[in-house]
Amino acid sequence: MPAPVLSTKLTMEHLTTLYQITMTMNSSLEFNEALANVIDAMMQATKAERGVLMGYDEETGQLRLLGAHGITGEKLAQEEAYSTTIVNQVVATRQALLTNNAMFDTRITPGQSIIMRGLRAILCAPMLSQDRLVGVVYVDTSMRTGAFTEADRDLLSAIANQAGITLENARLYMVAVEKGRLEHELNLARQIQQGLLPRRKPEVSGYEVEALWQSAREMAGDFYDYFSLTPDSFGVVIADVSDKGAPSALFMAVARTMIRSYAFAGASPRDTIGHTNDLILDDAESGMFVTVYHSVFQRDGQSIHINAGHNPALICRAATGETHLMPRGGRAVGWFPDNPLHETQLQLQPGDVMVYYTDGLTDAENPQGENFGEARLAAAVREGLGGSAADILNHIVVAVEHFANGVVPFDDLTLVIVRYTG
């Protein structure tokens, strides 16, 4: 429906007033201040006792009160702010409505608010944006001398059109400010999360350790860790929280702290993960859980491994080039009590490589929707065998990127390489 045509009775004085009002309405991009400016401008222009501004929700088909002021500036509650009879008619017709005798106007059926408040003159106009209803402006008065003219109606219609632009600009500005604040906080949270990743490699001779951490969002649910336990041993952890975003990042930080605390206290790998599981179950009410793979390596190549529902690590033997997956076992941490964890012992030989990864690597897709998978991972490790841990990691990453062929990752990707040099 086209916007109403302005009457020729919109005088030069009204046009001057409209210009001044427009300047006032646009004097602030702060939403609440812009809202107050619009209502004050409407009441000033029409000399009304009350002014009301409502927004229209297209999804629900309902109006919501944005602001309502009395003649002295007092705020009005929704139930006392306006005549629903008039407003509903304007919403239905998308046309401005003017009455100076609301009690006896044959075009409307007086509602409770009109009768109880003795409303005499009411003026209401739709806020339209490209023929789309975005809200309603409304003014009224009960004073006997109060009367609105057709020029007032046209002026309010013009104000309504400008008000829609003003409030939309203020809303977009508020959204932009909030988005900027949120992006700043997310970037800060990402920096904090990155700060939780280990910076110093274990100082145990006979090993090379390299790692990669890539988040699909601002914050990740994946994490890895490695830390020296004694002069002759160090631990490695890789984990994947069940959720993504900020909740998983917080859960990740908690799980990492618990695992480190138990490991540094001298607990065995099995007890470290078992105690972490029990403590998270006692404290967590989020329903989230985390899959964990934890290993401890000794200087002589002896190693102990615990799998709590995570992707099994891959071992590649340098002597034969054979690869196989370590045993699956246990349940994710924070899922069930009495987690059935089992230790696997392994003796490494010089050149042997252990590969830890999250499902963001094996689930990476190509344009045909195929997954990279464990077989391609094993092939990439064999192809890189003989190089350093850094060389093997880079070879795997290049293989995944070549396979994905431009498909954007949908999940976090974490990769840890441990190479025993003997």
Image: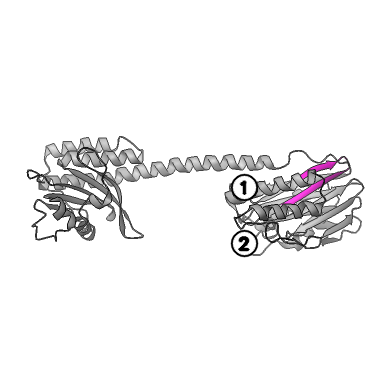
Examine the rendering and report whether any part of residue 397 can be seen.
Answer: no
Foreground: disc 1 or disc 2:
1
User: Residue 188's spot in the image, x, y percent?
Assistant: 58, 39
Q: Nearer the viewer, residue 400 or 191?
A: 191
The earlier-in-sequence mark between 1 and 2 is 1
| Residue 367 - label | 2
| Residue 278 - label | none
Based on the displayed image, in which of its 4 quarters is residue 90 positioned? Answer: bottom left
Examine the rendering and report whether any part of residue 374 can be seen.
Answer: yes
Q: Nearer the viewer, residue 20 or 236?
A: 236
Say what secondary structure mark 2 lies in: loop
Relative to 109, 29 lies left or right: right
Q: Amino acid at mark 2?
A: Pro
Q: Residue at x 85, y 54 (%)?
A: 304
- Residue, disc 1: 250
Q: Which residues are magenta?
A: 226-238
User: Residue 103's spot in the image, x, y percent?
Assistant: 10, 55
Main structural element of the magenta stretch: helix, strand or loop? strand
